[in-house]
Amino acid sequence: MWAVCAVATAAYAQGRGGRGPQVVATPDHAGWQYVPGENVTFTIKVVNNGTPVIGQKINWTVGPEKIRPLAVEPADFDKFWQDGKDALAKVPINPQRTPFPDKTTETVNACQVSFQTVKGAGGRGGSRLYGILTEPKAEGKYPALLRVPGAGVYGVSGIWKESYDDAIVLSIGIHGVPLNLDGSVYQNLGARALDTYQGFNLDSKELYYYHRVYLGCVWAVDYLASLPNWDGKTIVVVGGSQGGALAIVTAALDSRVTALAAFHPALSDITAYVHADCDLRRVQHHRRAQDADAATGDRALHPAGAERAGECMDPGGSEDGAGAGAEVETGWKARLPGSVAC
């Protein structure tokens, strides 16, 4: 069952917005709920730009235990991050609060908070991490929720979701910029100074952009744990895309995190990009070509892009499930356990 879910998810991601090929798996039980040992039946269909593809062969495999990461853990991995946390612990957190009336309600107080963290990508001095904190007005002890953001450069409108009258919520940004500035500030930063920030200082593990971000997330957990109205037990981290990755990393680095929710996490097994037998950049070229066609009103697959994507074919695979992937007519392949999404 899991593998078919993965087929549908991977193929849908490649054909988001209704463009390109998609594999859709529909179970015979609402909610995908089955008991151990129960037979599982799916209806599978392949569509291309919304049009059904008839007679298409789909190769699949079963078993999440067959997924094998391509990343190799460095010998100094644990020591590197422990050293980072030790260095973080020496930084005065120096928290600051500013009331945030726009998000304050009858039952919840809101403020913009910031605190000192480790030096940023420039390698000079410390930096601050900003967030929006909401706390129930009623006295008591409450669980805490840390929201970590998806990729991009945002103000409060991009990182704040909701508040609760029965939980503390901290929604953070990662770029060291206050969250209550004019929207044009974030647009300009995203288009200029922070464009492609994901690759800043990629050749230095100490100064890489996300090094500061990951440790900043740990500091956010520390900040929540320092609040007098925290219940002392529960800290949940949640995020999607970049935020999904940050949720996983934060939980891995800080044992005080009791639960996490990661939606379509980015930055997952990214070394597959260089180890895979297909070049994912060709698929990206294909997607950009589709976007360009869509912008001109032509939603047909771009021939050059389809040809390049077609080169990303896995020579293995068979109808009996021995192969990994779901091949569709344009040459896309959603590759599954033991391989990499292509």
Image (cartoon, rainbow, N blue to C red):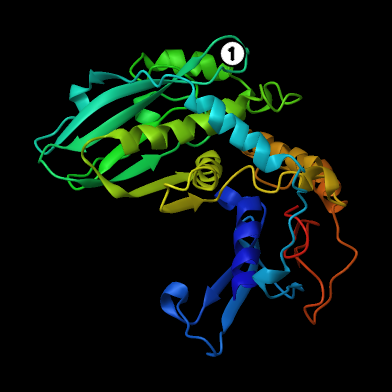
Give the residue displayed 76% in from the left and 66% down from the top: 325
Image position of 315 (left or right of 174): right
Question: Are there few (<14), some (14-19), or many (20+) residues within 10 Å of tag 1?
Answer: few
Q: Is residue 77 left or right of residue 175?
A: right
**Residue 301 location in percent, x, y?**
73, 47
Identify the image quadrant of residue 79.
top right
Which one is nearer the viewer's eye here, 210 or 310?
210
Q: Is 122 placed left or right of 129 in the picture?
A: right
Q: Residue most toward the top?
A: 124
Q: Residue 212 at what x, y percent from top left?
A: 56, 26
Residue drawn at 52 percent across, 45 percent down: 244
* Image: 230 above or below 182: below
* Three-letter code, disc 1: Ala
Left or right: 140 as drawn, with respect to 125: left
**Vertical order, 258 against 173 (above or below):** below
Camera sees residue 128: yes
Count numbered badges in the picture: 1
- The residue under the point 62% across, 36% down is 81
- Residue 160 visible here: no
Give the percent coordinates (x, y) of residue 193.
59, 13
Residue indicated by mark 1: 193
Residue situated in front as seen by the camera: 50 or 85: 85
Tell me the SS state at disc 1.
loop
Q: Nearer the viewer, residue 86 or 183?
A: 86
Quadrant holding the N terminus: bottom right
In the displayed structure, would residue 208 be above or below residue 68? above
Quadrant in which residue 283 is drawn:
top right
Percent coordinates x, y for residue 103 in the rendering: 21, 29
